[in-house]
Amino acid sequence: AAFVKPFALSIRLFANMIAGHIVLAILLGFTSELAHGLSGMSIGVAAASILGATVISLLELFVCFLQAYIFTFLTTLFIGMAVHPEH
């Protein structure tokens, strides 16, 4: 039972990280698909995809630090509860 909470935290951290990578891959996939056509609309969509990918990258960086903080905080709480159980 002591391994369930840290394992669940690890799965949550992994899921948050992979979700950001999937969104980035999709946005950058739009850019590579639209690079073949050089119409004004495809260039605009490609530019918007690159801007969106940049914003998502910054958001993913923020989420990374936030998730690391939450993971560390909750892990220390769980370890503290395991070492010093309340009666």
Image (spheres, helix red, strand yellow):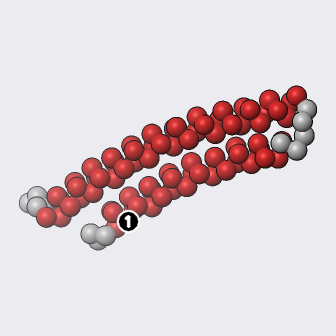
Q: Quadrant of the C terminus?
A: bottom left
Q: Height in image: 16 above or below 46?
A: below
| Residue at screen point 51% across, 53% down | 17
Image spot of residue 54 (x, y percent): 60, 37
| Residue at screen point 74% across, 48% down | 29
Classify mark 1: helix, strand or loop: helix
Q: Amino acid at mark 1?
A: Phe
| Residue at screen point 77% across, 36% down | 46
On the rendered structure, is 18 left or right of 39? left
Q: Disc 1 marks which residue?
A: 7
On the rendered structure, is 25 left or right of 31? left
Q: Nearer the viewer, residue 23 or 80?
A: 23
Q: Residues within 10 Å of mark 1 (few under 14, many from 20)?
A: few
Image spot of residue 56 (x, y percent): 58, 39
Count up the numbered dots. 1
Image spot of residue 31 (x, y percent): 76, 42
Quadrant hosting residue 50: top right
| Residue at screen point 77% across, 44% down | 30
Q: Height in image: 76 above or below 61?
A: below
Q: Nearer the viewer, residue 12 or 59?
A: 59
